[in-house]
Amino acid sequence: MITIYLKQYNKIVREADIKLFDELGYDDILWIDLLSPTIQERKAVENFMELNLLTRQQIEEIESTSKYSETENAIFSNTNFFVPSADGFSVEPVSFIVSEGVLITTRNAEFRTFNEAAKRLQMNARAYNTGYHLLISILEVRIDADADLVENVAKQIAQLSKEISVDGEVDKRDITRINSLQEQTMLIRENIFDRQRILSGIQRSERFPNDIYPRLQLMMRDVNSLISHADFSFERLDYLQDTALGLITIEQNNSSKILALASVVFLPATLVASIYGMNFKKMPFLDWDGGFFIAMLLIVALAGGTYLIFKRIK
């Protein structure tokens, strides 16, 4: 699907017909948004903008040059956005290209970030003179969304820590939740680093309008604070994991202590029973009428005495 945002009389008009490229020029278009585009839509944009759109494999590359690069006619920037899922969220790559003042975005999933950016664009079209301004606005919205994710993970960590502290017990579900939150935190931190690398590339560029650079400084501060917050959350999860493993060790030690005490208490009794289980002809008390009861009394006395001794020495 393709959405073309046109500049018309200080307002933005949305269109979805690729035939408009035959009638329009670069100055008429602010944004071309490609959502899971067809081959025909990709070819139409490439022919109109006179450039090659990136493939999904190229977008997903991890090299620093793939995150932000400049050519003679265009600026290329790739990053990952989060998509909510049943297990937390998944990651989808997004490509940004700015050429001739037109922003071109390529993606394969719906994002609230793009919807929010489109709303801002409709509400205040004058604030977005070029695709450069729109790119910065989308990144601002995305950073705000990243902050919400970091805050949400921090709340989950605090809730889990409170549950473990109150109950004093840890089960498999708690360990699984800790591992899941660790994975989410690492993923969030990695993607925030992507944002940092893109902003660094933009700051070094000389193509962006001058009014954008003060906004970049504020965005860089926000990104750095999010990285610090994510690092703190990860350290807190490490501490929580150590606490959980410590509680598990204590529970295991208590179980081992009970088993050891039981075996020690019944060890003398087992010895007496083993002796009287021997098949010798001459054994004490075998000929007595009350020999069985004497042996049982001896077993109980030894077990009780052993228990009292260990209880006294704590």
Image (spheres, rainbow, N blue to C red):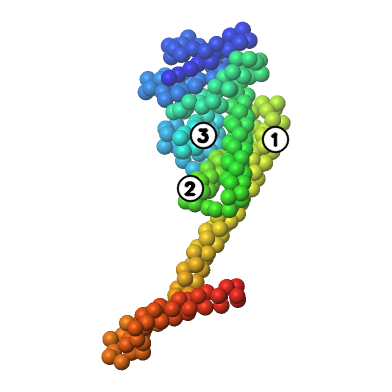
Q: Quadrant of residue 118?
A: top right
- Residue 83 disc label: none
State the separation of the CA atoms marked 3 and 1. Answer: 24 Å
Q: Residue at (55%, 30%) from the top-left corner?
A: 75
Q: Which of 313 and 51 is in front in this view?
A: 313
Q: Nearer the viewer, residue 180 or 281?
A: 281
Say which element carries label 1: helix
Where residue 302 sits in the image (x, y, percent)?
Answer: 47, 79
Residue at the front extreme, as displayed = 289
State the separation of the CA atoms marked 2 and 3. Answer: 25 Å
Sequence order check, earlier mark of 1 and 2:
2
Where residue 11 sits in the image (x, y, percent)?
Answer: 61, 10
Dot 1 corresponds to which residue?
217
Seen in the picture, residue 284 relative to 212 is either above or below; the reply is: below
Sequence order check, earlier mark of 2 and 3:
3
Q: Residue at (39%, 79%) from the top-left corner?
A: 293
Give the label, 1 or 2, closer to the camera. Answer: 2
Dot 2 corresponds to which residue?
173
Dot 3 corresponds to which residue?
82
Give the label, 3 or 1, closer to the camera. Answer: 3
Residue at the bottom extreme, as displayed = 282
Query: Disc count in the image?
Result: 3
Q: Would you call the spot at circle 3 few (<14 residues within 10 Å), some (14-19), or many (20 or more)?
A: many
Tell me which amino acid carries mark 2. Answer: Arg
Seen in the picture, residue 261 relative to 222 is either above or below; the reply is: below
